[in-house]
Amino acid sequence: MRRFLYIRCYDSFEFLATLKTLHFQLQKEKEAHGSGVYLLMIDSIGAFYWMDRASPSIPPGSNNRRSLSLQSVSDIAVQEIQKILVVHPMLVLTTKAASLPDKFTSREVIRSTGQLSIESNLDSRTIRSSTNAQLYREYMPSVWQSFVSHRILVRPSDDSKYQKKPIYLSEWLLPSLKLSDKFTINEDGAYIVS
């Protein structure tokens, strides 16, 4: 666990503060352990989205500061991650809840993951699986969407209700590869279901 650095943020300001100081933490860890960082994982990148969206813009504290709004918080976060990647090249993996039609319950947590990089803007798209079509609505600001190069939707499979262990379906959204895999997870790891 010595090689694992865990930082928990409770709001967008803590997240931004963490990103601003992450370069120094990574440099300190590299000097202490002699190896660099190869993976940055951000769990639930949209965790503060709804709170940020509901809160009014915070006016600047001085003349050289801009107001903090949902868009500016996202802009700053992307800029800080880009700065980190220049000095510490690594894979950035993020998860976030997907916004799908109301037919899904809160127990069916759906996450998408992706390596962050520059790509095109997606507002909404239709996901076509072998059984049905669903609307996937992107709610993150466009600056985040333009930063994502790969996107995979992971959701419970319809086959899960007939099995002892849940079966999940992963579908490539970006780039659109028309590939999907069914898998299950147990104590030994993840296994592809044929």
Image (cartoon, grey):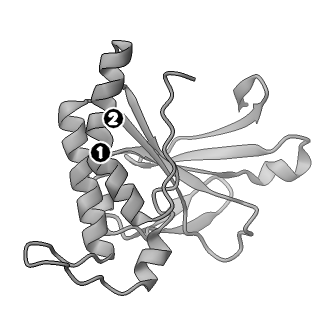
Q: Residue at x 70, y 36 (%)?
A: 183
> Contact, CB < 8 Å: mark 2 with mark 1?
yes
Using the image as rendered, state which of residue 145 and residue 45 is in the foreground: 45
Residue 158 is situated, as x and y percent measured from the top left of the image, at 77, 54
Q: Amino acid at mark 1?
A: Thr
Question: Dot 1, crowdedness within 10 Å: few (<14), some or many (≥20)?
Answer: few
Q: How much space separates mark 2 and mark 1, taking CA atoms? A: 7 Å
Q: Residue at x 45, y 70 (%)?
A: 49
Q: Residue at x 25, y 30 (%)?
A: 88
22 up-or-down from 52: above or below: above
**Residue topped by disc 2:** 25
Tell me the quarter of the image containing the N terminus.
top right
Q: Amino acid at mark 2?
A: Gln
Query: Which of the numbered marks, if any, corresponds to residue 21?
Result: 1
Extreme residue toward the top, this view:
34
Residue 61 in which image quadrant: bottom left
Residue 80 is situated, as x and y percent measured from the top left of the image, at 24, 50
139 up-or-down from 96: above or below: below
Tell me the quarter of the image containing the C terminus.
top right
Residue 17 is situated, as x and y percent measured from the top left of the image, at 33, 55
Residue 159 is situated, as x and y percent measured from the top left of the image, at 80, 49
SS state under label 2: helix
